[in-house]
Image: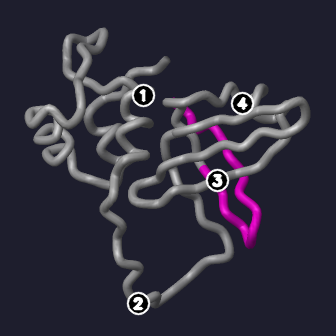
Amino acid sequence: MPNLRISEAAALLGVSDDTLRRWIDQGRLRSVVLDNGRKGVSGTELAEFAQHMTEVAEPGTTVAASARNRMKGIVTRVIKDGVMAQVDMQAGPFRITSLMSRESADELGLEVGSVAVASIKSTHVVVEIPEA
């Protein structure tokens, strides 16, 4: 499972690097040592932590909107059967669920802790893998 830099993990949760470091110091989230010797966070643990975040941002007043939104997040759950897959993601304070073919989920290598991008158009959510 991938490990993420502090800045990557913070961006996926929609918080500052300092906030994520405070959470680590407070014991709310465990850190790992990355290959470069710096602190990071396990993708699997970040996915579990993201599921338990209870702070939901107020939507505020919309001054502009687009037909397409792309939200980078972390996969928090994948349920597969013979034909379909349900993929849950946490993108900052937003929980996103996508239904796709099992084949698509397998081809993307989606698993808990994977970083992905949800492209939202109308009622359809398309999950993509960003460049590293």
Q: Secondary structure at mark 2?
A: loop
Report the residue marked by disc 2: 61
Residue type at numbered disc 1: Gly
- Figure quadrant of residue 103: top right
Report the residue marked by disc 3: 97
Report the residue marked by disc 4: 108
Q: Secondary structure at mark 4?
A: helix
Residue type at numbered disc 2: Thr
Residue at screen point 37% across, 47% down: 52
Residue type at numbered disc 4: Leu
Residue at screen point 76% across, 49% down: 99
Q: What residue range appears in magenta?
A: 118-132
Q: Secondary structure at mark 1?
A: helix
Does the magenta run of residues contain 122? yes
- Figure quadrant of residue 130: top right
Determine contact: label 3, label 1, CB under 8 Å: no
Indicate left or right for 63 with 14 as reference.
right
Earlier residue among tags 2 and 1: 1
- Look at the magenta stretch and give its main secondary structure: strand
Report the residue marked by disc 1: 43
Spot occupied by residue 118 in the image (x, y as percentages of width and height): 62, 52
Distance Cα–Cα, label 3 vs label 4? 16 Å
* 60 w.r.t. 17: above or below: below
Instruction: Give the mark toward the camera: 3 or 2.
Output: 3
Spot occupied by residue 44 in the image (x, y as percentages of width and height): 44, 26
Earlier residue among tags 2 and 4: 2
Spot occupied by residue 115 in the image (x, y as percentages of width and height): 52, 36
Determine contact: label 3, label 2, CB under 8 Å: no
